[in-house]
Image (spheres, grey):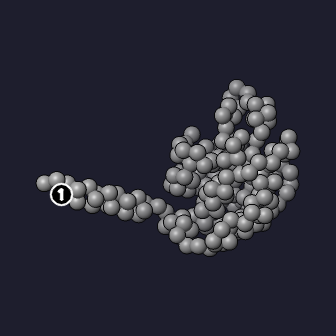
């Protein structure tokens, strides 16, 4: 009887894993399993800078391109640069693929924020969190040119890869590499 329970548990675990994989969106799953270059085009709306970068060559991250992205995502108010979690760029790339907007520019509203900048932005009703993932280099606020904001939100929620905030009045979606949650 004990041997049967072990086999049953093993099959249940395998079945659960297969269900989890099956629930991944097909395009997003393909980008996870297929080693290919990942390219982003990002416009920083606050600085006017634009960057087209291949930050991942299909096998490894390109350190020079990540440095360029870190600079683009900098706290422009304080002119401070922080290393951005590469998983955030992966998340953004997968979102674009899933939405069929791989060639459409990402409009960056906010990337990294120093603690001083974050604290200065915190006003009642502003929606700026005291312990924001922006201050850790793990969050961004953005929209994608030519793609409905609500569709970006829906795709991000389907991916279950971190936090997703929806700000239609301010015309942006927030994503981060923290735990999966939504607001």
Query: From where the camera sits, is residue 101 visible?
Result: yes
Locate the C terminus by quadrant.
Answer: top right
- x, y (%) of residue 140? 69, 48
Query: In the picture provided, is 173 more to the left or to the right than 155?
Result: right
Q: Does residue 54 lie above or below 44 as drawn?
A: below
- x, y (%) of residue 84? 71, 51
Residue shown at 37% from the left, 63% from the top: 18
Q: How many numbered discs?
A: 1
- x, y (%) of residue 149? 64, 52
Q: Does residue 117 lie above or below 110 as drawn?
A: above
Residue 61 position by quadrant? bottom right
Give the residue at mark 1: 3
Residue lying at the far left in this picture: please name it. 1
- x, y (%) of residue 21? 42, 62
Residue shown at 70% from the left, 47% from the top: 137
In-front residue for pair 37/170: 37
Label 1 CA crowd tier, 10 Å (few <14, some 14–19, many 20+): few
Residue shown at 49% from the left, 63% from the top: 25
Residue lying at the far front in this picture: please name it. 3
Question: Label 1's element?
Answer: helix
Residue lying at the far top in this picture: please name it. 124
Locate the N terminus by quadrant.
Answer: bottom left
In-front residue for pair 20/27: 20
Query: From where the camera sits, is residue 121 visible?
Result: no
In-front residue for pair 166/38: 38
Residue 124 position by quadrant? top right
Residue shown at 68% from the left, 31% from the top: 130
């Amino acid at each position: 009887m004990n041997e049967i329970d072990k086999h049953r548990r093993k099959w249940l675990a395998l079945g659960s894993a297969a269900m989890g994989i099956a629930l991944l969106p097909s395009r997003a799953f393909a980008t996870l399993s297929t080693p290919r270059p990942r390219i982003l085009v990002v416009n920083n709306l606050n600085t006017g800078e634009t960057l087209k970068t291949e930050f991942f060559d299909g096998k490894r991250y390109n350190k020079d391109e990540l440095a360029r992205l870190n600079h683009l995502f900098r706290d422009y108010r304080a002119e401070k640069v922080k290393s951005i979690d590469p998983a955030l760029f992966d998340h953004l790339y997968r979102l674009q693929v899933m939405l069929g907007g791989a060639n459409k520019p990402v409009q960056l509203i906010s990337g990294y924020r120093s603690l001083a900048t974050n604290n200065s932005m915190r006003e009642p009703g502003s929606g700026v969190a005291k312990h924001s993932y922006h201050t850790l280099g793990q969050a961004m606020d953005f929209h994608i040119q030519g793609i409905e904001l609500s569709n970006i939100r829906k795709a991000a929620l389907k991916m279950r890869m971190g936090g997703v905030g929806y700000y239609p009045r301010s015309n942006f979606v927030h994503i981060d590499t923290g735990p999966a949650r939504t607001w």
